[in-house]
Amino acid sequence: MSDELLFQPNAAALAHTRTTEADYEAQYQRSIDDPDGFWAEQAKRLDWVTFPKTIKNTSFAYPDISIKWFEDGVLNVSYNCLDRHLEKRGDQTAIIWEGDTPGTDGKATYRELHERVCRYANVLKANGVKKGDRVTIYMPMVIDTAVAMLACTRIGAVHSVIFGGFSPDSIAGRVEDCGSKIILTADEGRRGGKTIALKKNVDAALSKVGGVERVIVTKVTGNAVAMEAGRDVWYDDEAAKVSADCPPEPMNAEDPLFILYTSGSTGKPKGVLHTTGGYLVYGSLTHELTFDYRDGEVFWCTADVGWITGHTYIVYGPLANGATTLMFEGVPSYPDASRFWQVVEKHKVNVFHTAPTAIRALMGAGAEFADKYDMPSLRLLGTVGEPINPEAWMWYYKHVGKERCGIVDCWWQTETGGHMIAPLPGAFPTKPGSATKPFFGVRPVVLSPEGVVQNQTKAEGVLAIADSWPGQMRTVYGDHQRFVDTYFSQYKGYYFTGDGCRRDSDGYYWITGRVDDVLNVSGHRLGTAEVESALVAHPKVSEAAVVGYPHDIKGQGIYCYVTLMAGEASSDELRSELRNWVRKEIGPIATPDLIQWAPGLPKTRSGKIMRRILRKVAENDFGSLGDTSTLADPAVVDDLISNRQNK
Ligand code: WTA
């Protein structure tokens, strides 16, 4: 599809928008020329105990990376998401909850949510949690999870939410890394008609890691779970002992707000640390402008709160803006592929935000499921998490948006806190597959792989950012050096995103995917190193190399080359054993798609695995293997090619 396919905003979008093209250009320029002035103004969208005098104090000068925004400001996140709305919209629905099983739902008004959060905050205090303590949250998609997150922010505790699909080993690693003494969980979760044994996973994790003194369990399914006396308590019992009166803790803008673990190209997942003021200013502003959100609208982001998209665009952004946000417990395909559209009609959703992998899966199920629903409430559609192929964009536009709704393709990362490159609806035309132009205050640069800035408009290379923005992560929890090394050492003076991109002659950005060893499987980030270390932990595996390959639904699939220990025989049984092994070690999202037995891996004479070759074989692209003469044993490549797996 050509770059020239432009979708002009229609009359409805133009009538709705608060940002015209001229506004966008002028405001963008101002945000770059005068970041202090621009962001001081934006900071007024929050209620501060002390309004900041110092706005931006940041440096990307390697190796002294330092990022501070609004550093002398004082505020509380839960106050901004709850208390300040009570007078005007106490009875407005803050969160609509739609259960996994059709027909189950619930809601909380701002007043109810405020009460629940204050009570939960008192439960945390009564269980010994203090300002600055880390609190692990391993909970399903229920309102209580948002309550637990906000309760942490109310007392200044730092939450670390772990996606419910992660395994006991993954939980143990994260609990240990941040030294969390308390875990908030539920008996079980529900998803796609199945239950997820959350408490059981926590128990298994706690058999591997010490230091956790308290587990607070919310009853969700009501099925029996083991409770360890002295350590585990039921939330309801604790809540009955405390009041619902809990004043918000005044926090410095740079106090830690939360940690969210994410995969990188090396080592274990790292704890991305976000802080209080900058994150909330950025999250709420991007929510309002990218979705052109207006009072009274129903906003639905289908992410899980265990990911950054759930943090910023289910909980913090919408609630800071006094929005009605929808939380969905289920999956798009259960009971059938019309589930999303049913929910859109049932709750009269105005803005719907999902991931390309879901769109592709629903597209595969057939357009009739979406075509049955008119969805007149819909105004705008969002997509996030991975590059969207133009076919999926067009399908979304036609069958979901009925050629009436614009699409905002939002590029950003766990590290960025909020959208970085995304169209502002109505401000300029969109192009299927392009995240379009930078948000206010964001200075993208395209670098050649060697680090030369590409100044001409039309360019291709890797994507870096030239200056800080308020939503930027501040450090890797407990390891600032890793922060500096990961994001600032390769291209000095820039934040390196790890993504490749091109910029077309109109200045639109097209993200082409990761250029490092990070996979994006169904919009979930996974380090190849994590899957490799899970594989080699199996007693029969001697060596493993993992790469991504194009997958119709998932975007990328997980392709594993495995060398067995001497004397071990390969078999289909061993293949499924290894698949289950990785699931158990990391979680279902890391399940290998293809496993190829490789008696040898392509290595240089110094022993380095040549991943480029492995990628090409996995991609079925044998014509461009490049120079293989530097390999210690070039014959390995022929074996790899002749044993390539495709199912
Ligand atoms: C990819 C999710 C293309 C990208 C918010 C990035 C995208 C990684 C898009 C971050 C998009 C996210 N177009 N690629 N609209 N959005 N990505 O940390 O590779 O889970 O670096 O944050 O997802 O994934 P993360």
Image (cartoon, rainbow, N blue to C red):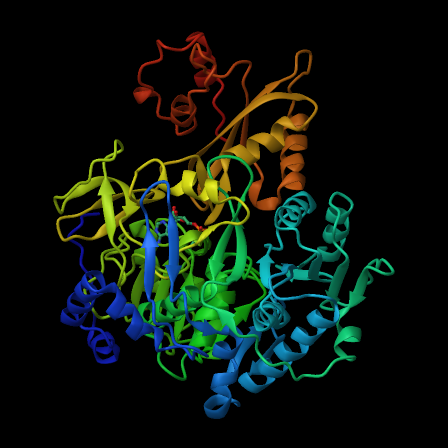
Q: Which of the two residues, 306 or 76, is positioned nearer the viewer here?
A: 76
Q: Is residue 627 rendered to the left or right of residue 602?
A: left
Task: Name the residue: 51% across, 79% down.
Answer: 79
Q: Is residue 417 positioned above or below 524 on the image?
A: below
Number of disc labels: 0
Q: Is residue 425 rendered to the left or right of residue 633?
A: left
Q: Quadrant of residue 418?
A: bottom left
Given the current orientation, which residue lies at the most extreme bottom position? Answer: 87
The picture places residue 516, in percent across and down from the top left corner, at: 39, 35
The picture places residue 10, in percent across and down from the top left corner, at: 20, 72
Q: Is residue 471 visible?
A: no
Q: Is residue 111 visible?
A: yes
Q: Which of the two residues, 208 or 224, is positioned nearer the viewer here?
A: 208
Q: Quadrant of residue 408?
A: bottom left
The picture places residue 317, in percent across and down from the top left corner, at: 43, 70
Q: Is residue 343 rendered to the left or right of residue 210?
A: left
Task: Name the residue: 57% across, 86% down.
Answer: 111
Q: Is residue 220 positioned above or below 483 on the image?
A: below
Q: Which of the two residues, 473 or 196, is positioned nearer the viewer here?
A: 473
Task: Name the residue: 43% across, 54% down.
Answer: 473
Given the current orientation, which residue lies at the most extreme right position? Answer: 229
Q: Is residue 585 positioned above or below 341 on the image?
A: above
The picture places residue 357, in percent across and down from the top left corner, at: 44, 51
Task: Name the residue: 73% across, 45% down.
Answer: 209
